[in-house]
Image (cartoon, grey):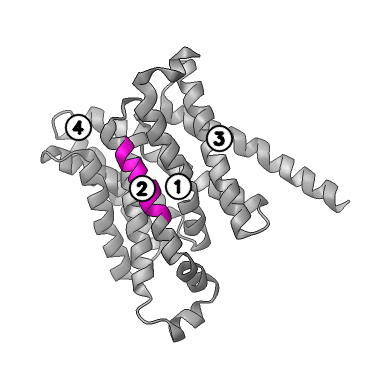
Amino acid sequence: MDMLFDPLFHKAWLTGLCLSAFLPVLGLYLRLRNEWLAALGLAQMSAATGLLGYGLGLPVLVGGPLGGVLMAFVKQLTKASNTVYAFMLIAGWSLTFLVAANTHLGESLGHALINGQLYFAETSHAIAGGLVLAGGALLLRLVSHHLLRATLFPHHEQLNQPAPWRWHLAFDVLVAISMGVAMASMGLMTAFAMVFIPAWLAFKVAGGWQQAIMIAVGFGLCGFITGFAVAVLFDQPYGPCQVAVYLLLAAAVVPLSHYAGHKKTA
């Protein structure tokens, strides 16, 4: 157990806690907007541009989010939601491995970005994770009612809101930066699982929006703490172990919530 509190893992703990508290909330908005594929598409493109930037001497933590932001502007210009994200996913996957195969240390770095490497988080990752949590929470607080109204009452927004693209672009950029940081910190599939699974579970069991946020954040944090502890204690790769824990917890929670709901009805 002492391994869990080794100073070697302090930065990894801090990075993971920040991201696992915020990404599930981001996932709720993406699911509400029917743009859940954005998380995977933007993360994949961030991995590709992170490797490209690495080949040019930029840290992955810089190149990844920058590429994601560029793709957010592309999405805004094309006015296509999941369609453009699907193309980002395919193009990003192709570009990631082409760059990985043709740059110094690119192949090992490419696999690390895909599979997850939170064990090796540095101070820059912890700072970036903290900024994503604090800045993302503040931005969502400012644009949340606009995003909810645009989704639930689209005609009201079109008739009464000047330049509604500002809120949508701000949210897209937030998703791009968050997924870029998460991809560079913990790997592509782990970041996607953190966005997708807690939000999916919250939509299954929550009775309202505020309750959904609490469930998603709670599940995200508990899943991260459990997954990271299991990975460290049993000497397992972090990314696959984290995703497996999320899946197992979701498989356990959903039947229990259905049982509780049937019992309450009866």
Residue 106: give its label: 4
At label 3, which amino acid type do we have?
Cys
Q: Vertical placement of 234 versus 19: above or below? A: above
Check residue 136 for magenta coloring.
Answer: yes
Label 2 with label 3: CB-CB less than 8 Å: no
At label 4, which amino acid type do we have?
Gly
The residue under label 3 is 222
Q: Earlier in the sequence, mark 4 or mark 3?
A: 4
At label 2, which amino acid type do we have?
Val
Magenta-tinted stretch? 126-137
Label 1 with label 4: CB-CB less than 8 Å: no
Residue 132: give its label: 2
CA–CA distance in space, label 1 to label 2: 8 Å
Q: Vertical placement of 156 versus 68: above or below? A: below
CA–CA distance in space, label 2 to label 3: 19 Å
Of the pair 92 and 229, the residue shown nearer to us:
229
CA–CA distance in space, label 4 to label 3: 33 Å
Q: Which residue lies at the image location 37% right of the left edge and 29% below the top edge? A: 12
Q: Earlier in the sequence, mark 1 or mark 3?
A: 1
Residue 22: give its label: 1
Q: Residues within 10 Å of mark 4 (few under 14, many from 20)?
A: many
In the rendering, at what x and y percent does residue 208 appear? 64, 59
